[in-house]
């Protein structure tokens, strides 16, 4: 990424994050992809214009993006409890923060509104698009298909059940489209394949030109999805990103590289999406399995960012933040000169933020203790002494930046869960 405007495949980027969300439990594997696939097929069957087919596809790809914990994910795919709209509204709120996705935020917001003989065309005075109803139907179809039985054998019973709810839960023309699709076996075989969206026309994955500032906005949205899963991490990535950004400036990185560092900071713990909440939130010492699971998060950060070719440098800066110069880090055991300066900066920013930030169970360390820990790590050649010295030379300034960024993220966290009693 060497220019200010980059051609990024937005769908690929979103697939990266919702696939990560689906890694958390085997029951969820490919759920977002399956719903994206089937939503598109229904819209295509209904002869929607291509632009609208794309919107339905995109909405399917991110529809549960606002369901952050494993429990919530399992609950919303299992049935439609009375609180079903919470994750949909939260997801829409997240998507609205990123300009290019505002147009699909409403489709996500209303993806559990019942059709209700046409009353479902509005909700609390706001219009609800039929495209939301398509995603709703695709979602409920996918959750009824169980991986243990042959898909074609279970199809008649699944369709019977859905047809009974035509007009009440589901919009009738979408049900009709689904009935037509049910006769084509390949659709259902595609749906349960490894990567259903790869069976769709490549034109759905169009490259959009995004400015680097748009990518910063989007990675900040991603950082909330990563961090808001737990009050223990609610503002962590904001602190790391802003610390790393400032260090990069002080160490002579170009303005564009500094922005890339901000993005890498927001995404450094992306792989934590694959880690069980019980492990993330355990206040006591982790047992061996939990410890190993936690340590695998940077491997997943690497693997997920690896799908975006334009993120090659960002991937290394982000995913190597637990590597150490003396070879004691993990998981790639990259050491010494092989560890890029950007990754060394991220390692220092991560340790600095982790020890100075307040956590629900403890206050952050004071300046003196924090500096002593960082100094010791640099003396042992675990982290880069030059980067640590740069931090020490501007300690108060960087610490204030970190605190402000984390306070802003905490305020968003509180707003996200306000009036929902979900914590
Ligand atoms: Fe949902
Ligand atoms: Fe980490
Ligand atoms: Fe971290």
Image (cartoon, rainbow, N blue to C red):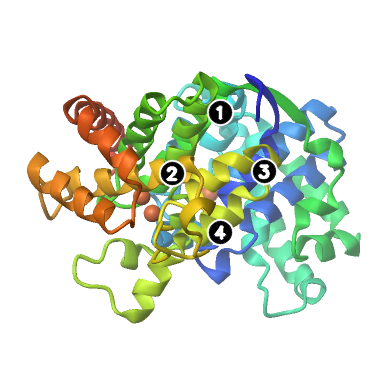
404 relative to 132, above or below: above
First reached walking from the N terminus: tag 1 or tag 3: 1
Residue contact between numbered discs 2 and 4, judged by CB atoms under 8 Å: no
First reached walking from the N terminus: tag 4 or tag 1: 4
Q: Name the residue carrying label 1.
A: 215
Q: Is residue 380 left or right of residue 101?
A: left
In the figure, residue 293 lies in which quadrant? Answer: bottom left
First reached walking from the N terminus: tag 3 or tag 4: 4
Between residues 380 and 5, which one lies in front from this camera angle? 380
Q: Secondary structure at mark 3?
A: loop
Residue contact between numbered discs 4 and 1, judged by CB atoms under 8 Å: no
Q: Position of residue 68 (x, y in %)?
A: 42, 51
Q: Name the residue carrying label 2.
A: 225
Q: Secondary structure at mark 2?
A: helix
Q: CA distance from mark 3 to mark 4?
A: 18 Å
Q: CA distance from mark 3 to mark 2?
A: 19 Å
Between residues 47 and 340, which one lies in front from this camera angle? 340
User: In front: mark 3 or mark 4?
Assistant: 3
Specify whether residue 278 is in view. yes
Q: In which quadrant will I find the N terminus?
A: top right
Q: Name the residue carrying label 3.
A: 308
Instruction: Estimate how packed mark 3 is, as few (under 14), some (14 to 19) or many (20 or more) residues with alpha carbons within 10 Å.
Output: some
Q: Position of residue 227 (x, y in %)?
A: 36, 46
Q: Residue at x 54, y 53 (%)?
A: 338
Residue 22's label in the rendered image is 4
Instruction: Estimate how packed mark 1 is, as few (under 14), some (14 to 19) or many (20 or more) residues with alpha carbons within 10 Å.
Output: some
């Amino acid at each position: 990424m060497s220019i200010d405007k980059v051609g990024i495949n937005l769908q690929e980027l979103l697939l990266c994050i919702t696939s990560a969300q689906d890694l958390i439990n085997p029951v969820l594997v490919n759920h977002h992809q399956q719903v994206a696939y089937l939503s598109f097929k229904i819209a295509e069957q209904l002869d929607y214009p291509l632009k609208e087919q794309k919107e339905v596809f995109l909405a399917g790809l991110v529809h549960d993006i606002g369901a952050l914990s494993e429990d919530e994910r399992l609950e919303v795919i299992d049935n439609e409890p009375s609180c079903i709209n919470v994750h949909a509204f939260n997801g829409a709120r997240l998507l609205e923060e990123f300009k290019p996705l505002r147009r699909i935020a409403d489709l996500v917001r209303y993806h559990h509104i019942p059709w209700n003989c046409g009353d479902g065309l509005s909700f609390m005075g706001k219009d609800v698009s039929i495209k939301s109803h398509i995603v709703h139907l695709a979602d409920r179809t996918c959750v009824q298909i169980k991986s243990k039985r042959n898909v074609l054998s279970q199809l008649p019973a699944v369709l019977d059940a859905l047809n009974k709810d035509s007009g009440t839960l589901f919009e009738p023309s979408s049900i009709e489209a689904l009935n037509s699709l049910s006769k084509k076996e390949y659709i259902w075989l595609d749906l349960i394949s490894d990567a259903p969206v790869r069976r769709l026309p490549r034109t759905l994955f169009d490259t959009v030109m995004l400015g680097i500032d748009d990518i910063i906005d989007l990675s900040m949205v991603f950082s909330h999805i990563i961090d808001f899963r737990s009050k223990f991490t609610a503002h962590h990535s904001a602190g790391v990103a802003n610390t790393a950004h400032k260090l990069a400036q002080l160490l002579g990185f170009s303005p564009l590289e500094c922005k890339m560092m901000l993005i890498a900071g927001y995404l450094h713990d992306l792989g934590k999406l694959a880690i069980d909440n019980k492990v993330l939130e355990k206040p006591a010492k982790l047992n061996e399995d939990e410890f190993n699971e936690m340590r695998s998060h940077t491997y997943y950060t690497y693997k997920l960012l690896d799908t975006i070719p334009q993120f090659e440098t960002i991937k290394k800066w982000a995913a190597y933040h637990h590597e150490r110069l003396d070879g004691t880090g993990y998981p790639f055991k990259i050491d010494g000169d092989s560890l890029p300066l950007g990754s060394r900066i991220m390692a220092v920013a991560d340790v600095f933020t982790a020890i100075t930030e307040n956590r629900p169970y403890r206050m952050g360390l004071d300046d003196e203790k924090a500096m002593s820990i960082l100094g010791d790590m640099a003396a042992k050649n675990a982290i880069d002494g030059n980067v640590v010295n740069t931090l020490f030379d501007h300690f108060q300034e960087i610490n204030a930046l970190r605190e402000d960024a984390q306070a802003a993220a905490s305020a968003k966290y509180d707003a996200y869960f306000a009036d929902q009693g979900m914590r």
